[in-house]
Image (cartoon, grey):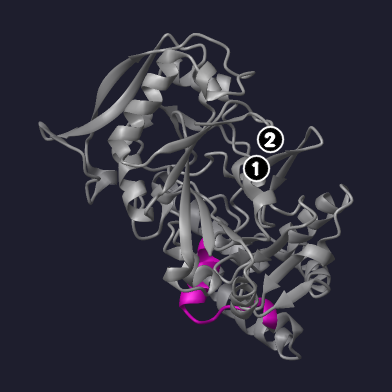
Amino acid sequence: MIDVILGLQWGDEGKGKIVDFFAPNYDVIARFQGGPNAGHTLYVNDKKVVLHQIPSGIFHQNCVNLIGNGVVLDPVTLKRECDTVASFGIDVRKNLFISEKTNVIVPTHRALDKASELQKGDSKIGSTLKGIGPAYMDKTGRNAIRVGDLLSKNFTTQYIKLRLKHQKLLDNFHFIEDISAWEEEFFEAVEFLKTLNIVSGEYFINNKLAEGKKVLAEGAQGSMLDIDFGTFPFVTSSNTISAGVCTGLGVSPQKINDVIGVTKAYCTRVGGGPFPTELHDEVGEALRKQGNEFGATTGRPRRCGWIDLVALKYTCMLNGITKVVMTKADVLDSFKELNVCTGYEINGKITQEIPFEINRTIITPEYKLFNGWNTDTTAIKNATNLPNEMSVYINFINQFIGAPIKYVSNGPAREQIISL
C-alpha cells in the first residue's frame, strides 16, 4: 500500500522534515508532482539541506527514492542536488531512480517563464521563474522532452525542434536575454542525468508494491496551489492533492492507504494570490520573524497570517486526510492571544466554503479568539506535558476540520516532534 504526505495550505508547511521523520518506516519514497520550485528543508547532521527534486528519503540508506513521471525535472538543479547529497557520503546511483516518462525542463522553459511573468506586470502570479509552467504546458501540448528521450539518438533533433518553437514565442515577448550559458550548463547536466538509474516508473513502483514494499508518496507545494482546486489562477501547474499520486506515479486509487496532511499552526504564502487571513501588522511581522518565514528556494519573505480553518477543512475533504501533522507550533509560543479563522464573511453572509472566484471576492475572516500558552514548548517530548492552552487550540482544530491531528512539530530538528 501507498501512504501519502502532502501540504494542506499554500506550501512551505515543513513537509521535508515530516517525510524525513517517517522515512525509516518505508522502503520507497516517491515524488509524484511539481518541480524545482519546491524546497523541502531537512537537517542532516545538524546541517541545513534544501532538496528541490530529490525525494526527502535520500538520506536514509535503506530507502529507495523515485522521481515520478508527474514531476517536471530540471537536470541542472538535479545535478547540483546530487553533488550536495554526495557530500554527505550518499551514493545517489545506488538509491535514486527516475521515471523515463518524467518531463524535462529545458533552458527556454525558464526564459519563457521569465518573459511571461515580466509581461504580466502588476498581475503577475509570483512565479519562481524555474520554467515549471511552460514545461507543464509542453506536456499537455504533447511537445515535451521526457527523460527517456535523453537516451535516444533523436534527442538533439527533438531539442532543436522544441527550442525553435520556444524562440518564436520569446520573439513575441521581445525577450533578448542571452541564454547560451544556460544551455551549456543544461547539456552538461544532461550527460550526468544519463548516468543515473532511469526506469519505467510505473512498473518500478507497482513491482515494489507487489513485493510487499511500503511506499510513501511525497507531494510538493500545497493543496491550495492545486491547478484545479487551488486559488486559481494563483496556483502551480500540477495536481498537488492526493489524486495526483495516481497519475504522477502510475498507481491505482485502491493502492492508497493513509493520506497524511501537513499544516502549520498558522498560515503563510509566497507570491501573489488571495490570502484571507493575511496580517499586514506587527503580529504578521512577528510571525515572520519567529518562524523565519523566508522561502527555501527563493529567499522571498513569506506572507503570514492566522490559521484558516475554512481552507484547511476544504483541503482535508479534497485529499481524504486520515492524519494531520501540525508543524511550527513552537512559533506561537510567545503570542498572548491567537486567532483562528472559522468562516468567511462575503457580502454580509458567513460561509464555510471556498468561493469560486476567490481572487476577486472580498472576504472578511470570522475569527475565534484563543489564549496563547506563553511557554517554551521546544523541549517537550510527551503530549501529556503540552500546555493546556495548546491542547485546547489543537482540539478545536481537530473538531472543526474533521481530521485528527496526530503529530505536533515543535522545532526544526528531526527529534522535535510529539505524538498525540
Q: Nearer the viewer, residue 32 or 108?
A: 32
Please say whether residue 266 is visible from this viewpoint. yes
Quick check: 198 above or below 400? Answer: below
| Image quadrant where residue 189 sits | bottom right
Mark 1: which amino acid?
Phe
In the rendered structure, the answer to whether residue 400 lies left or right of residue 338 reads: left
> What secondary structure do most residues of the magenta stretch adopt?
helix
| Mark sitting on residue 414 | 2
In the rendered structure, which disc, 2 or 1, sits on the residue that comes first in sequence? 1
Q: Position of residue 173 (x, y in %)?
A: 51, 63
Give x and y (percent) for residue 346. 16, 36
Residue drawn where x is 21% and y is 44% of the image: 353
43 vs 197: above or below: above
Residue 15 image point, x, y percent: 57, 44
Where does the magenta region start and end? 133-148
Q: Which residue is at 46% across, 64% downward?
A: 244
Residue 237 visible in the displayed image: no
Locate residue 170, reporting x and y percent.
55, 68
Q: Residue lying furthest left in this view? A: 348
Q: Which mark is residue 160?
A: none
Q: Which residue carries the number 1 mark? A: 21
- Toward the viewer: 154 or 388? 388
Q: Amino acid at mark 2?
A: Arg
Q: Quadrant of residue 43?
A: top right
Decide: is 83 above or below 247: above
Instruction: For mark 2, give the secondary structure.
Output: loop
Circle 1: element type: helix
Q: CA distance from mark 2 to mark 1?
A: 6 Å
The answer to whether marks 2 and 1 mark residues whose Cβ atoms lie closer than 8 Å is yes
